[in-house]
Amino acid sequence: MIEERLEIPTLGAEVFLYRPDRLAEYPGLVFITDVWGVRPAKVRMAKRLAEKGFAVLLPNAFHRYSRNRPDGFWVEDEAAQNRALQELFAALTPAQMDSDGKAYVDFLLAQTNVKNGQVGVVGHCYTGQMALRMAAAMPDRIAAAASFHGGWLATEKPDSPHLLLPKVKARLYFGHADNDSLMPKEWIDRLEAALRDWRGAFESEIYQGAAHGWTVPGRDGVYNELQAERAFEKQVELFDATLKA
């Protein structure tokens, strides 16, 4: 496994790039963490995808909030958590998701051993919507986009991510928790109705027995190994079909 720690000068954003070796070109993936940032569990998740034959870019998507920290941005105190969450959300607005996403894709495709052409993107939690927004902002460059336990994907607000579907050409995958206050059933139903009207290639599934954040190893009381493995296989299937065909 080749690992590089780099920085995108135009953003001041630290990124990690993982790929199996230096002897071949690999299709590119942008792996965006949840709101708590780059930390050992997320690094392991990104490396696992790279081992399947991809060049995986793992950016610090919340670079306006802080530079990378060894254990991400999680804080134990509940009041401090709430303050941190509001600051993290403010550090990555919808407009910044578009502009930063374009910078990530440009940077990834400029790297050695990364195939030219289209890339994939996967987001988690707050950045599930970023994957969709990137697909809408770069319809000819994003071949596939996935969201796991993504929140706020189909709200009643005028800037709700699901309203961008007419701009998307990518194949989409949504994996929802069945117990998630950030993406309740009403919003899942609204998203799926919009997806059917869109008539693009998509899959939207509810993972039974899964709570918000179930894909992240080490989250006590939240991580669901069985469903996390299923989610991983869904990602590999999606990106194999769209980036390696």
Image (spheres, rainbow, N blue to C red):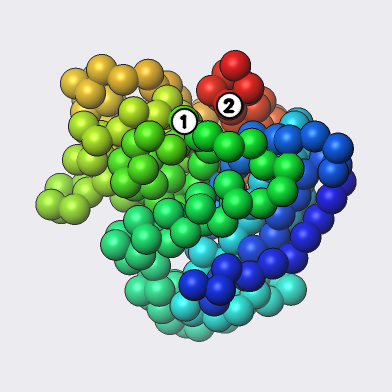
Helix, strand or loop at mark 1: strand
Where, quadrant-wise, is the C terminus in this rendering? top right
Label 2: few (<14), some (14–19) or many (≥20) C-alpha neighbours in 10 Å: many
Residue placed most toward the observer, 49 or 18: 18
Instruction: Say whether residue 232 is left or right of residue 205.
Output: right
Q: Residue at x 44, y 55 (%)?
A: 101
Q: Find residue 186 and report its image quarter.
A: top left
Q: Position of residue 108 (x, y in %)?
A: 59, 51
Q: Residue at x 19, y 53 (%)?
A: 159
**What mark, if any, has residue 243 been given in the picture?**
2
**What mark, if any, has residue 143 been given in the picture?**
1
- Labels 2 and 1 touching (C-beta < 8 A): yes
Q: Looking at the picture, which amino acid does disc 1 mark?
A: Ala
Q: Looking at the picture, which amino acid does disc 2 mark?
A: Leu
Helix, strand or loop at mark 2: helix
**What mark, if any, has residue 204 been given in the picture?**
none
Q: CA distance from mark 2 to mark 1?
A: 7 Å
Q: Position of residue 206 (x, y in %)?
A: 45, 28
Q: Residue at x 64, y 36 (%)?
A: 115
Q: Position of residue 217 (x, y in %)?
A: 72, 49
Q: Position of residue 210 (x, y in %)?
A: 55, 37
Q: Find residue 166 and report its image quarter.
A: top left
Name above or below for residue 118 compared with residue 161: above
